[in-house]
Image (spheres, rainbow, N blue to C red):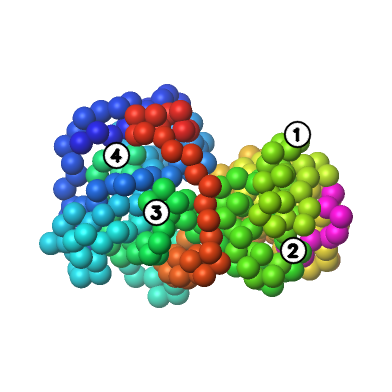
Amino acid sequence: MRAMILEKQGVPLSLREIPPPEPSYGHLPIRVHACGVCRTDLHVVDGDLKEPKLPLIPGHQIVGTVVDNSKGKGKFTKGDKVGVPWLGGSCGFCVSGRENLCDNARYTGYQIDGGFAEYTVADEHFCFTIPPGYPDLQAAPLLCAGLIGYRSLKMTEKGHRLGLYGFGAAAHIIIQVARFQGREVYAFTRKGDIEGQKFAVSLGAVWAGDSESAPPALLDAAIIFAPAGELVPKALRAATKGGIVVGAGIHMSDIPSFPYQLLWGERVLRSVANLTRRDGEEFLALAPRVPVRTEVHRYPLEKANDAL
């Protein structure tokens, strides 16, 4: 099979012809139809995340078809369309539903070969059924941008005025869910990104501006998707008392010091780590009801470096 392989962090992926992977017990061989490109893939390739297996096939927003279920445990059958997310495995003994925090968790496209290839294998317990009606390309972003966005949105509790810092893959999905829930959304982009601001407004944002600007109303909650630590004090400054600021990324640049007054007033600053299987089941059931529509750009496998 063909695969795009990371041989060393900090260098482009290489196109290689390698044997298809063999599944172990409880794992499914999957023919990959599409794999989304995530900012986390870029963090892995660039070396911001320090512990990848090497050589590595990146990619963790995988949509594909089960080729054979002979080593599975009955959750899926041959021919089923499945999605493979970032969380690829845990120790299996978490009784609190927080396998996303497992010290022994393993991640697709990081410690496990991912979807920048024609075939992959995945633990069936960490795969999801793709909702009917979603083409492969439109389904792929749901598996990380959508799932992490959804978990982040849940962390904001019932906040009505919601700020989204960084209007990319996750934000363009989760704004649709937030509007479905009746929330007001305020979108923050890089300075000068007029097209991004127009896109946010077209999806229902009541205001869109750059991250240097203050929104016209204090926010009940904010999600920071951009991996820029300097946005944390900005979001706290824009939040009302009791407001919640959620850091959604797996990697962020250093957060600058800020006065306690920005946190005072029972404001909450918290992070999101990965996802749980329950998040996936909830979000993939909700997405068709909204319905969530994803905007995608198609690249052939050999152009993965261009996509990154």
Q: Which x, y percent locates residue 27?
A: 22, 58
Q: Is 85 a magenta residue?
A: no
Q: Residue at x 62, y 43 (%)?
A: 227
Q: Residue furthest left?
A: 70
Q: Earlier in the sequence, mark 3 or mark 2?
A: 3
Kindly state the secondary structure of the residue where label 2 is placed. strand
Residue span colored magenta? 214-221
Q: Is 217 a magenta residue?
A: yes
Asked if residue 308 is positioned above or below residue 122 in the image, the reply reads above
Q: Which residue corresponds to mark 2? A: 184
Task: Estimate the spatial distance between the alpha carbons at disc 1 and disc 3, rounded to whole Å.
Answer: 33 Å
Q: Residue at x 71, y 44 (%)?
A: 198
Q: Amino acid at mark 1?
A: Gly
Nearer to us: label 2 or label 4: 2
Q: Which residue corresponds to mark 4? A: 117
Q: Which mark is residue 135?
A: 3
Q: Which residue corresponds to mark 1? A: 192
- Asked if residue 40 shows in the view, the reply is no
Q: Quadrant of the N terminus?
A: top left
Nearer to us: label 1 or label 3: 3
